[in-house]
Amino acid sequence: MTVTAPPRLPSPNDPITHGEFDALVEALIEEARKRAQRRRRRNGAIVILVALVGVTLFTLVDRTTRSQTASPALAARSSVPTATVSAKIAFVHNPRGNSCCEDEVYVMNADGSGLKLLSRIVTTGLPGGLAWSPDGRRIAFAGFPPKTGGIHVLNADGTRQRRLTRTANFDFAPTWSPDGRKIAFSSGPGGLSVMNLSVMNADGSGRRTLTNERFSWPHDWSPDGRKIAFPSERDGNPEVYVMNADGSEQRNLTRNPAGDNLRTPDIQQTTAEHSAWSPDGRQLLFVSNRDGNSEVYVMNADSSGQRNLTRNPAQDSDPVWSPDGRTIAFVRGRNGNNRPAREVYVMNADGSGQRNLTRNPATDEAPAWSPDGSTIAFLSQRDHNYEVYIMNADGTKQRNLTRSPTNDGSFAWSPPPR
């Protein structure tokens, strides 16, 4: 590059003509133009250099973040929303397929990977057969009598398995109190129609029977742990009751000659603890046949404001609140039939916007929301036996997680991190 010396300015004592002055002005203008061009080239080079450095830094940071979390990549591969990937699903599996009650406890990631056997103790596989502790560190499950009957607890990695109850009764459906200090469970001499609700400390001590009747299952702790909702037939027909966590002040909430229950208790169903209570504890979902068929109802926690949400001639049952309390998932029997041909639906909390999510000829049931509300797990028979499926909350990307030739039954999401 040739550098031209700038024109010399005349000193005040130098004489100058008009022609010389014009030439000097033109020279100064030309020099200013050349300097401006050099500045633009230099500034342009600086801008390009800064941009290249920025792109390089952004790429390095993005790669570092991806390597640390692995969640976005995993979500892309598995079609599971990113926020759900860290959650796990525990479930019971029948390895032989030759009995209703030869199930084992497994755990897997929300995309179906990381399958791990936690316990070979024979479990019931019945509704509410297992439950996570609120801190996500332990799992309670029900063994099948006589040899492994009772409530068992183990760490989420399968270690430190302990049997908490040892009686001749049939103990099942354990649920943890929200603070993780107690476990409520149903107990009876046999079958699902003769049982009482009991509670014990999380280590198995301090067991007490809270009800004294022939039907008190399923049950749900209130979100604050102060109350337990449960069904009872003490007044001649099924009704929804509530009591304090110590068993005191038992009260009939529904008071209707029809049959009312928290959810239908005769399917391979498990839902998260507190599924009947709204997340804020102000309302309760229940199922009633007071309109001639099974419908999903809601009421305030003090029993006021009871109303039908579904209003459909088909059989509606098994409602569960979304974590934010804005949406309710439930099961509807197609063509008015309760079973088979069931589908998973969702609706707004006021009953509006009812939509079929699963849309499959086979039976789909037992919806359970992921802790972040982005996905719903459910049981399906579309592969000729019960399997655990997952889908986005809008019904898209339905996938079989367990893929087993034998039945997978009761399942539960791990709780959100604290």
Image (tube, rainbow, N blue to C red):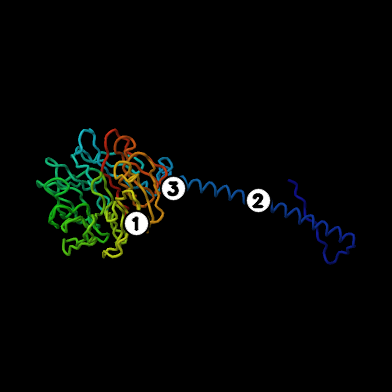
The x, y position of residue 115, in whole percent, is 30, 39
Mark 2 surroundings: few (<14), some (14-19) or many (≥20) residues within 10 A: few
Report the amino acid beneath label 2: Gly
The x, y position of residue 175, in whole percent, is 22, 52
Residue bearing mark 1: 309
Q: Are marks 1 and 3 in contact (CB under 8 Å)?
A: no
Secondary-structure class at tag 2: helix
The x, y position of residue 211, in whole percent, is 14, 57
Q: CA distance from mark 2 to mark 3?
A: 32 Å
In the image, residue 298 above or below residue 397:
below
Q: Residue at x 50, y 46 (%)?
A: 59
Which is more foreground, mark 2 or mark 1? 1
Q: Residue at x 41, y 54 (%)?
A: 353
Which is more foreground, mark 1 or mark 3? 1
Q: CA distance from mark 1 to mark 3?
A: 45 Å
Q: CA distance from mark 2 to mark 1?
A: 66 Å
Q: Earlier in the sequence, mark 2 or mark 3?
A: 2
Residue bearing mark 2: 44
Secondary-structure class at tag 3: helix
Q: Which one is in front, 29 or 144?
A: 144
Residue bearing mark 3: 65
Mark 1 surroundings: few (<14), some (14-19) or many (≥20) residues within 10 A: some
For the C terminus, which image quadrant? bottom left
Residue 161: numbered disc: none
For the N terminus, which image quadrant? top right
The x, y position of residue 362, in whole percent, is 34, 39
Q: Which one is in front, 360 or 228?
A: 360
Residue 208 can be seen in this image:
no
